[in-house]
Amino acid sequence: MSRPQEEALTSSTDAPAPPASRRGLVLGLWLLGALLSGLPFCFDALEPLVWIAPIPWMFALQLSTRRAFLWGWFGGTLYVAIGVYWLWDVHPIVLALVAAYFGLTIGVWAFLTGPV
């Protein structure tokens, strides 16, 4: 094998791995924010998490400018669903409707705030 062929072969295998999907990162940030916001409703000892809970959402807003409302609605719905998990005993559809309705507030916040 000639020298240029060896260099071409080694350079193609040493290429860095592609970065994580932006959509996956945004999804993870919204999930993390929803967990950090919703868990203090379930466990009183976790109340200090409320002070840092919006931070992942703000990073997610930097990455998802065009679909900020939809991502915010998604994250807000999860946040409310975690907070009012007891509505599952009433009926799962009631939980879904209440969470989606009150999750709109986070969606509107994300739309109005946009990239910080």
Image (tube, grey):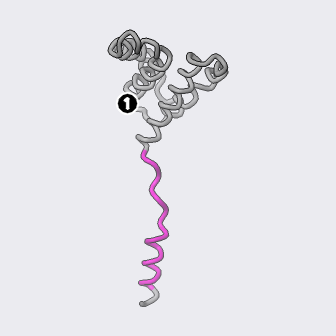
Q: Where is residue 72 in the image (x, y as percent from the top left)?
A: 43, 24
Q: Where is residue 56 in the image (x, y as percent from the top left)?
A: 55, 31
Residue 27 vs residue 45, the one in the foreground: 45
Q: Position of residue 54 (x, y in %)?
A: 56, 25
Q: Quadrant of residue 53?
A: top right
Please name the residue shown 42% across and 20% down the image: 77
In the rendered structure, which segment of residues is drawn in magenta?
A: 4-21
Residue 61's place in the image compared with 7, above or below, is: above
Please name the residue shown 35% across and 12% down the image: 91
Q: In which quarter of the image is residue 78?
A: top left
Q: Is residue 15 magenta?
A: yes
Which residue does the numbered mark 1 point to in the structure image? 67
Residue at the farthest front position: 89
Q: In this view, does 52 lie to the left or right of 17?
A: right
Q: Quadrant of the N terminus?
A: bottom left
Residue 16's place in the image compared with 52, above or below, is: below
Residue 82 vs residue 72, the one in the foreground: 82
Secondary structure state at the residue bearing disc 1: loop
Three-letter amino acid code at disc 1? Arg
Residue 94 vs residue 52, the one in the foreground: 94
Please name the residue shown 61% across and 20% down the image: 50
Residue 34 vs residue 63, the one in the foreground: 34
Q: Position of residue 59 (x, y in %)?
A: 53, 34
